[in-house]
Image (tube, rainbow, N blue to C red):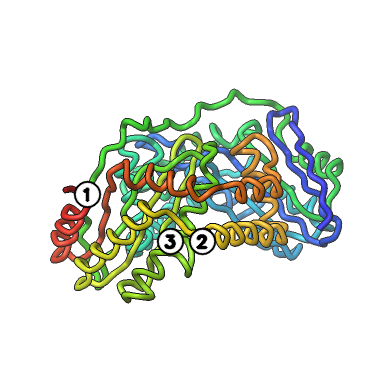
């Protein structure tokens, strides 16, 4: 694809990012509001996600149904999601309809009414979403692990909030939260596709408020010394045992992030990874086993998940400990390094074939690094990583820092899980 990228600072404080791709007919647009669960107090936990729901429920000019129909009238796709550090409203449409699509998106973002009836209905929907999530133990275990890892700091707040918080939240509470955070200078607008930057700027400015609002404080960071190892056992009547083991990670600003990506992929990021091969393919201990990393502005997490049978607990911990010791002490091979570098390179470039992926990557680059993160430069940094750097960060994360455990399973096996964990990791 031939493309041209422009970063434009608007007078109202918003950042407009435009990637011109004249070889396609579609346009992907995203409005990224820099508010997420980490910006919430204990009392407002879940508000960012609730607001994301409410902006689809009607504006001063259109009902919820009309918004859906108007977007589909132009053959467009409209959606949103909430993360720990931002909320995104995004759409995709044909290049000929980008003006109408942006008009509707900005109307939702700035002029939602939060009617009392819609609020009460959507509160029920959000609470059902929380209940559904709580019935999904292979996802819930990560949320509980995160809450324990970050303790009382806002990074540990669940994105969906809690049933109690949502049930007690009033329409006025939520509307005030929305008006406080959904301001132009708290937004990054990213657009990629068959557009011209000058035309897009005119369209965007015509649909956004012109005044700049005061900047809001960022969410509270967790000091490194605040981490305290923990064991959290959650009883649930289940056939499987869902285990999450992990430690604090690093920020996305950390220069070791590329070594971390390689380490994660080799350890448990794919079908050729150590954990997948050693625990699933060779021993049949699990259907799902993987490692993951989460990097935020001033912190992160590194973890391992496995869902295994109640009768496999001792065998799992023995095999897992063996895999981790070998990985830490011996590091990775030349072949693993080369294969992973190629996988990361291909994943990056294949993602760039989608206008939606380009739009998202553009916005995240600006929000995270304050500049466009050129793919070629990223690839060069990936290929500059040495085996020794991968082993070093593995040691720093998993050898120098004690592991913590979160487990969800039948009450009859929780004590055995804790016993096995303490046998291998609390000597």
Closer mark to the observer between disc 3 and disc 1: 3
Quarter that holds the N terminus = bottom right
Q: From the image, tell me which residue sits under label 2.
A: 336
Secondary structure at numbered mark 3? helix
**Which of the numbered marks, if any, corresponds to residue 268?**
3
Earlier in the chain: of badge 3 and badge 1, it is: 1
Furthest-top residue in this view: 214
At a point 54% along the width and 42% down the height, the residue shown is 86
At a point 85% along the width and 60% down the height, the residue shown is 23
In terms of depth relative to the viewer, which is nearer, 260 or 246? 260
Q: From the image, tell me which residue sits under label 1.
A: 231
Q: Position of residue 67 (x, y in %)?
A: 66, 56
Q: Position of residue 424 (x, y in %)?
A: 20, 55
> In this rendering, would 319 be left or right of 343?
left
At a point 34% along the width and 58% down the height, the residue shown is 326
Secondary structure at numbered mark 1? strand
Badge count: 3
Res 50 visible: no
At a point 73% along the width and 39% down the height, the residue shown is 16
> Could you tell me if the residues under marks 3 and 2 are in contact, i.e. CB atoms within 8 Å?
no
Residue neighbourhood size for the residue with mark 2, other residues' Cα within 10 Å, grouped as few (<14), some (14–19), many (≥20)? some
């Amino acid at each position: 694809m031939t493309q041209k990228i422009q970063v434009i600072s608007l007078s109202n404080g918003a950042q407009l990012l435009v990637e011109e791709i004249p070889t396609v007919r579609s346009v992907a647009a995203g409005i990224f509001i820099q508010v997420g669960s980490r910006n919430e107090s204990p009392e407002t936990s879940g508000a960012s996600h609730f607001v994301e729901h409410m902006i689809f429920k009607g504006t001063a000019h259109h009902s919820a149904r009309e918004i859906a129909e108007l977007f589909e009238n132009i053959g467009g796709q409209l959606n949103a999601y909430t993360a720990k550090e931002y909320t995104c409203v995004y759409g995709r449409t044909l290049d000929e309809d980008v003006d109408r699509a942006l008009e509707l998106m900005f109307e939702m973002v700035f002029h939602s009414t939060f009617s009392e009836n819609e609020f009460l209905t959507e509160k029920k929907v959000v609470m059902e979403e929380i209940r559904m999530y709580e019935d999904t133990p292979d996802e819930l275990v990560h949320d509980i692990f995160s809450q324990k890892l970050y303790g009382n700091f806002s990074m540990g707040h669940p994105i969906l909030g809690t049933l109690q918080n949502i049930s007690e939240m009033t329409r006025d509470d939520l509307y005030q939260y929305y008006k406080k955070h959904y301001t132009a200078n708290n937004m990054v607008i990213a657009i990629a596709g068959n557009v011209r930057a000058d035309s897009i700027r005119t369209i965007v400015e015509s649909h956004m408020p012109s005044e700049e609002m005061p900047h809001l404080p960022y969410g509270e960071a967790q000091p490194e010394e605040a981490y305290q190892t923990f064991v959290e056992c959650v009883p649930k009547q289940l056939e499987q045992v869902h285990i999450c083991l992990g430690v604090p990670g690093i920020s996305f600003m950390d220069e070791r992030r590329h070594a971390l990506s390689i380490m994660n992929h080799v350890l448990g990021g794919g079908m050729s990874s150590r954990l997948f091969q050693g625990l699933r393919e060779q021993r049949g201990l699990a259907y799902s086993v993987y490692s993951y990393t989460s990097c935020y502005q001033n912190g992160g997490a590194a973890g391992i998940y496995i869902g295994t049978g109640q009768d496999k607990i001792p065998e799992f911990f023995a095999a897992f400990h063996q895999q981790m010791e070998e990985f830490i002490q011996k590091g990775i091979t030349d072949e693993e390094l080369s294969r992973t570098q190629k996988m990361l390179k291909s994943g990056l470039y294949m993602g760039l074939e989608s206008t939606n992926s380009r739009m998202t990557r553009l916005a995240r680059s600006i929000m995270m690094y304050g500049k466009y993160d050129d793919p070629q430069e990223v690839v060069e940094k990936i290929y500059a990583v040495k085996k020794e750097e991968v082993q070093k960060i593995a040691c720093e994360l998993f050898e120098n820092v004690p592991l913590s455990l979160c487990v969800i399973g039948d009450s009859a096996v929780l004590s055995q899980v804790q016993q096995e964990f303490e046998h291998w990791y609390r000597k």
